[in-house]
Amino acid sequence: MAGKNKSIYVCTSCGYESVKWYGKCPQCGEWNTMDEHTPVVSSTKGGSLKSKVSVQSIKKLSEISSDIEKRINTGIKEFDRVLGGGIVEGSLILLSGDPGIGKSTILLQISQYLGKNKSVLYVSGEESARQIKLRANRLGVDTDNLYILVQTDIAIIVETIKAEKPDIVIIDSIQTMMIDEVSSSAGSITQVRECTNIFMHLAKSLGIPIFVVGHVNKDGAIAGPKVLEHIVDTVLYFEGERNYSYRILRSAKNRFGSTNEIGVFEMTQSGLKEVENPSLMMLSGRPKNTSGTCVACTMEGSRPILAEVQGLVTASGFGTPRRMCTGFDYNRMNMIIAVLEKRAGYFFNGMDTYLNVIGGLKLYEPAADLSVAMALVSSLKDTVVDEHTLAFGEIGLAGEIRAVNNCEQRITEAKRLGFNRCIIPFNNYKSLSKELKTEIDIIPVRTIRAAFEAVSE
């Protein structure tokens, strides 16, 4: 029949759509990822579309107001920092992370502060109202302006929001929401995409900020179609290991602010607590007079963070040496080791090499290269790097130390935390102020060998 909807096949990995099934996705190359779905057909006919077009919807750029958007403080400074200063009215915010990382916890804590003068609607599709109440009691959430709705039907949720008009809406989670008209099950690509579209239009039309909790798959990516991240205004990721009490909130997309800022939290029995000084937290409990350790400084947005890098180099018991790293890119570590062998004469042949960034922090910045190299060479030579010494700089394949950005901010942060010596790239030294050069011992270096010889004197 001509009017009957035909099934389509959608790749759960990349969102590729096809009218026929493939064992291997033609777009991303993944196997057995094509799921059958029934497309959603709009009831609007093509002939009636013309009558809905309004000339008044067109505006000149000069006629559009450029006033700064109104932001709502959440009561958690670290959360506001990642959002760019607070919640923007009418925005759709996606909060994602591993199970048990603290997504629902931080949203309940935010509800406690917002509930002082705003109404918050918490829509749960996973937990019962009693479960939410028990967690709220544990977190000390007792505001009278927090309303709970246990529902997964989008139609009922939308009508409730339109009738009650809350100031903030929290959807926990988007993978449990479903539209009756769509034949696929909750959490499928079609359901997630269509439900998110409805929440997006609802947030824009009513001017209500909506938080959407998203699950992640086994690879750590947000479950559902990739278009989900394109629809929302802000994408927030909660990072952290189960064995660590610290959590890092990172912005992967933000239409209203920077994506470089991070927020640091500590998970306690009473909920997530802000860590206002992450550097001090990362450096607590450092060993003294021990080889194989060096302090790095990485920039997370406008915030310099100091972290301890530990290296361990020991004789291998096998023909092929073992290399492992945590918190740093594995391939980059291998590149640094190759440069140390070829350009500096530090040989790791037949040696097992282990690298670890303390505290669960991940160093993505090339400026951490120098501290990683010094930690490895320190362990190889069994020579101690002074505990009050900081090192940062990018290592090139020729063994040179290249300049990095925000040099003065890094040195100022090191000075504030009691460090008295900084090893920096030679090209950065020229642009430093005279006052800073007199306040702390700064050693400019051109090569990795010169850097290690400077601390070995």
Image (tube, rainbow, N blue to C red):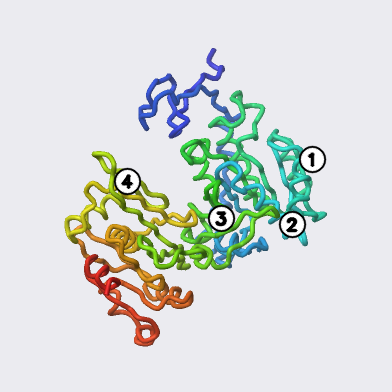
**Horizontally, is 16 left or right of 431 in the view?**
right
In which quarter of the view is residue 30 placed? top left
According to the picture, the residue beneath numbered tag 1 turns out to be 130
How many C-alpha atoms fall within 10 Å of the one at disc 4: few (<14), some, or many (≥20)?
A: some
Label 4 and label 2: CA atoms lie apart by 47 Å
Secondary-structure class at tag 3:
strand
**Residue 402 appears left or right of 217:** left
- Labels 2, 3: front one: 3
Give residue 403's position: percent from left, percent from top. Answer: 29, 69
Q: Residue at x 49, y 66 (%)?
A: 279
The mark nearer the N terminus, 1 or 4, is 1
* Drawn side of residue 123 relative to residue 385, left or right: right
For label 2, the crowd category at 10 Å Cα-Cα, with few meaning under 14, some 14 to 19 and many 20 or more, is many
The label shown at residue 49 is: none
What's the amino acid at mark 3?
A: Tyr
Circle 3 residue: 246
- Numbered badge on residue 323: 4
Q: Sequence order check: which comes first, mark 4 or mark 2? A: 2
From the image, state whether disc 1 or disc 4 is nearer to you.
Answer: 4
Q: Nearer the viewer, residue 67 or 173?
A: 173
Q: Quadrant of the C terminus?
A: bottom left
- Please name the amino acid that badge 1 sits on: Arg
**Can the viewer see residue 31?**
yes
